[in-house]
Image: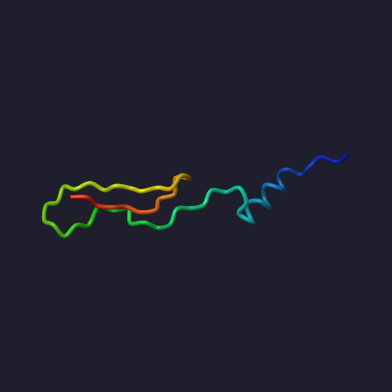
Amino acid sequence: MPTPDYQRIAQLERELGIGQPKPEPAVHTGPAVCLIKNCNGDDVEIRNWTGLLMRRIHQH
């Protein structure tokens, strides 16, 4: 019985996107933009149970 070609399987999985983590959507990662002068508020990140960033909220 022939052995599986694991390199070929890995290549096909990469091409099809199987088993690869989904990239996070582009979210502004620079400094917070706030309309209040000299704001020292914090940013809160909301993530789903898989760790995907869903929303970033700026709190004053």
- Depth check, front residue: 27 or 15: 27
Question: Where, by quadrant of the figure, is residue 51 drawn?
Answer: top left
Judge from the rendering whether residue 23 lies leftward or rightward of residue 15; answer left or right. Answer: left
Judge from the rendering whether residue 16 lies leftward or rightward of residue 46; answer left or right. Answer: right
* Residue at (13, 57) in percent of width and height: 36
* Residue at (78, 42) in percent of width and height: 4
Outermost residue on the bottom side: it is 35
Tally of numbered tags: 0
Judge from the rendering whether residue 46 lies leftward or rightward of residue 5; answer left or right. Answer: left
Outermost residue on the right side: it is 1
Location of residue 30 in the rendering, given as x and y in whole percent from the top left corner: 29, 53
Location of residue 12 in the rendering, given as x and y in whole percent from the top left corner: 68, 53
The colour scheme used here is: rainbow
Q: Quadrant of the N terminus?
A: top right
Location of residue 28 in the rendering, given as x and y in whole percent from the top left corner: 33, 56
Judge from the rendering whether residue 43 lies leftward or rightward of residue 14; answer left or right. Answer: left
Outermost residue on the left side: it is 37
Location of residue 38 in the rendering, given as x and y in whole percent from the top left corner: 11, 52
* Residue at (62, 51) in percent of width and height: 18
